[in-house]
Image (cartoon, helix red, strand yellow):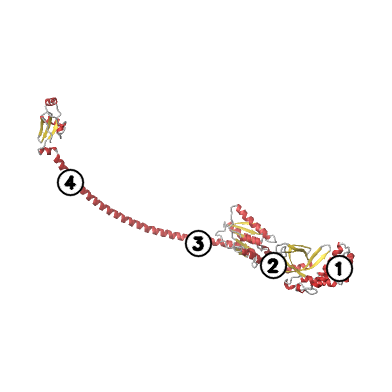
Amino acid sequence: MAKASKTVIKSIEDQLARLDLQTTSLNQADDVFLALLDDGEPDNKATAKHGSVDNLNDYDFSEQLAIQDRDSQLQQALSDTILSLSDYLSAVQLVISETFAHTVWVKAEIRSLSAKGGHYYFELADKDIDGKVTASCRGTLWRGQAAKVLSKFEKNTGMSLERGLNVLLKVSATFHAQYGFSLNIVDIDPTYTLGDLAKQYQMILTRLHEEGLLDLNQSLPMPFDIEHVLVIAPEKAAGLGDFRADADRLASTGACIFHYEHATFQGNHAPQDIRQALIHGIKTLANQAITPDLIVIIRGGGAVGDLAYLNDYELAALVAEQPIPVWVGIGHERDRVMLDEVAHQSFDTPSKVIAGIRNHLLTITQSAKQHFLTIEQIAKSSILQARHDSEQQLTKIQSAAQRQLSAAKLAMDNQFVQIRQLAYQQITTARQHTNQLREMTLLQHPSTVLSRGYAIIRTSHLASKDLVSLVSKGLTSHDLASKDLASNTVMTSIAQVEPNSTITIELQDGYLQATVNAKHPKN
């Protein structure tokens, strides 16, 4: 195959020589490629072997058109040549190695990264604004340079190379007939990655601010009492152990209850893992009819470079939208992550988070004690004041009652005097009236009337046989008159008596019986 490749290459070189294009074509290919480079790359690190083109307007396209015309003639000259795949790809390899032998700075996203035998194998890609891949290829960082390049990158960025990072690579193009096209990576610029991460951080921060999420959780009031705490942390993190040491002591006193959910805080999948743990923890507590009073997200103990994975919009938005205060302790004093920006409170370490909880509980306990003492003092003062007021009111009531009793007694005495006087007056009047009535009665008594010469006439009902019977019994005339009187009726009209009837006439000193001869009505 090597002999055949040399034959093909020799044939191509002969054709190029005949067309006087060999040197010109290679040089112009370099110039055209360099003319398409972005002048805005850091430090203008791309340099030309045969000069550079700063502006496409300065480039002589007429010469390029002439080259294309001669290339067309070359293509026609080779149109009848039959090559094997190996020969053809070997020729392509030669052209690429000759044309792109120099190194250039290329920016790309790491889609995947693996290591084997000290070599690092990359899958690189370029994306448009919609995230669609517009170009991709393989890249290799060989063992001889890997240690130096990676050490410099990690030292300056504080993080290791990972999938999803945007990097600026110093590369040269290579092509192999069997393995295809790839880029040889000889250097990686850490400042570009740091700048890109900072740019992404600011973009997320701006978006959260525009959507009103940045200060949303921070505006929540501090819970008065922290009873249930939902903790999101790596399962075996050193910071979690420090946190639990104090948390378990608090829990043993019954001050609060801690509920733990574990998540991975490293790698590209960390944000999604944390989100799932947070959602799962809230749902689990909700199924138990428990609403946490506080959510805690802690890391602690991981590499500083892993902090970049926590700068995720979806995770930050989820934390910001929680209706419960969220405290974070990511475990780094200098570098902030997006969770620090949106959390209700941010602490340097997990130990400071639990200290914050303990201090809050201590504060509300002291406040409760102070309130209790204040209430006790107010209660005592109120009782004393109420007792004093009651005594004063009792004194007033007693005085008022005494006054009312005195007034009532005086009024009663006055009423008694008045009643007695009235009664006396009425008795006197009644006595006088009685005397008058007695006198009038006496004046009208028959004996009094008879003493003045008047007589009482009654009808007599005793028959002759009755009189004979009574006389035979030895009754006197007075007895007979009395007997007859009891059965007679006082006459007040001549209509009560008929002629020839017997009447009894009562005088002062006795009775007369008379027979009515005639009656004469008054005219």
- Position of 505 with respect to 105 (left or right) is left
- Position of 350 with respect to 77 (left or right) is left
Q: CA distance from mark 2 to mark 4?
A: 133 Å
User: Where is mark 1, residue-wise?
Assistant: 73
User: Where is mark 2, residue-wise?
Assistant: 196
User: Where is mark 4, residue-wise?
Assistant: 432
Q: What residue is rendered at 63% in x and 61% in y?
A: 317
Give the image quarter of residue 357: bottom right
- Please rate how many residues cluster around mark 2, counting C-alpha atoms within 10 Å: few if below 14, some from 14 to 19, many from 20: some
User: Where is mark 3, residue-wise?
Assistant: 370
Q: Are marks 3 and 1 in contact (CB under 8 Å)?
A: no
Q: Earlier in the sequence, mark 4 or mark 3?
A: 3
Question: As shown in the figure, which amino acid type bears the numbered disc 3?
Answer: Gln
Residue lying furthest front: 523
Marks 3, 2: nearer the viewer: 2
Viewer-side residue, 324 vs 57 = 57
**Residue 69: percent from left, percent from top:** 84, 69
Q: Earlier in the sequence, mark 4 or mark 1?
A: 1
**Residue 471: percent from left, percent from top:** 11, 26
- Position of 315 with respect to 359 (left or right) is right
Q: How many marks?
A: 4
For residue 161, above or below residue 450: below
Question: As shown in the figure, which amino acid type bears the numbered disc 1?
Answer: Gln
- Please rate how many residues cluster around mark 4, counting C-alpha atoms within 10 Å: few if below 14, some from 14 to 19, many from 20: few
